[in-house]
Image (spheres, rainbow, N blue to C red):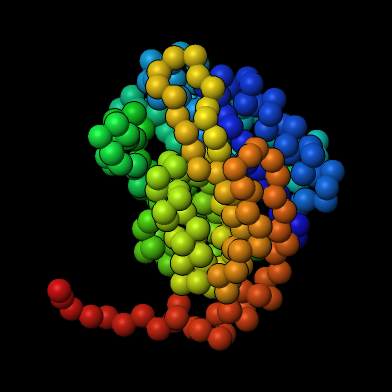
Amino acid sequence: MRCALVQMTSSDQPSENLAAARAFVAAAAADGAGFVLTPEVTNCMSASRRHMHDVLRPEADDPVLAGLSDAAAAAGVWLLIGSLALKPDPGAPDERFANRSFLIGPDGAIVARYDKIHMFDVQLSDTETYRESEGFRPGDRAVLARTPFGAVGMAVCYDLRFAPLFRALAQGGAEILTVPAAFAVPTGQAHWETLLRARAIETGSYVLAPAQVGTHPHSTGAARQTWGHALAVDPWGRVLCDGGDRPGLSFAEIDLAEVAKARARVPALIHDRVFSGP
């Protein structure tokens, strides 16, 4: 399977981002990709909760989800919409947004959806603070989707730092782990590649991580910058492609025989031991 990782600089205007993402999907398909992956918050990158409330929609009414589902069907590709920021579904326990990843089949139908579990609540410096949980409601369920090209375990961005999630996905059968992201620059520079390679090595899985990059256009609120460097990593921890620091497409080939080979050489997924303490 030829995979294409989308690296984009989403603005805070969903219609603009839909047009850009649709173009990437079509270009990836034209270059032979059967699986295309877009980054976290493909539809809207904004630091303003008020603006998000004005432009976002619930899943059932979201034009970016509908448009990208149509794009996947038109191209005949599998599509991971890395995530969409969405207004809460009817009956949700509170008014916070969802940060939701979607796996779309080549017929345009939703195959799986995953709500980001771990919220990015950090203070990186005196001037850079994030409190994702104030605006987004965390998910509470790991998601594994079975496809003709392999079993896909879904994660989003900050989830990357929580190795037990990825171990659980791999032990549940995942051969491919998706980590769409909008990584901040300081943490991206320091940790992004190391963590992605670690998750691949620990689980003997492919890790596919499309990314947001650059300074994001915004009509209101503070400017956001993201690290980029969309990566594909093979089950032995080798980097197959790196999207660098500009929007664009990166391509990688997946061969599930490499998953079996890595797990046979180091069968750590079956070596768990019960222990006490500390």
Q: Estimate the x, y position of residue 107 in percent, counting from the top left.
A: 75, 41
Q: Is residue 172 visible?
A: no
Total numbered labels: 0
**Which of these two is toward me, 219 or 52?**
219
Quadrant of the rendering where the N terminus is positioned: bottom right
218 on left or right of 80: left
In percent of width and height, residue 174 lies at 55, 64
Q: In the displayed structure, does residue 265 sit left or right of residue 67?
A: left
Name the residue rendered at 70%, 50% in the picture: 250
- Taking the spot 23% from the left edge, 80% from the top edge, the residue there is 275
At which x and y percent is residue 80? Answer: 62, 45
Which quadrant is the C terminus positioned in?
bottom left
Q: Is residue 219 above or below residue 266?
A: above
* Closer to us: 154 or 249: 249
Give x and y (percent) for residue 233.
59, 63
At 54% from the left edge and 35% from the top edge, which residue is drawn? 214
* The quadrant where residue 128 appears: top left
Residue reaching furthest to the left = 278
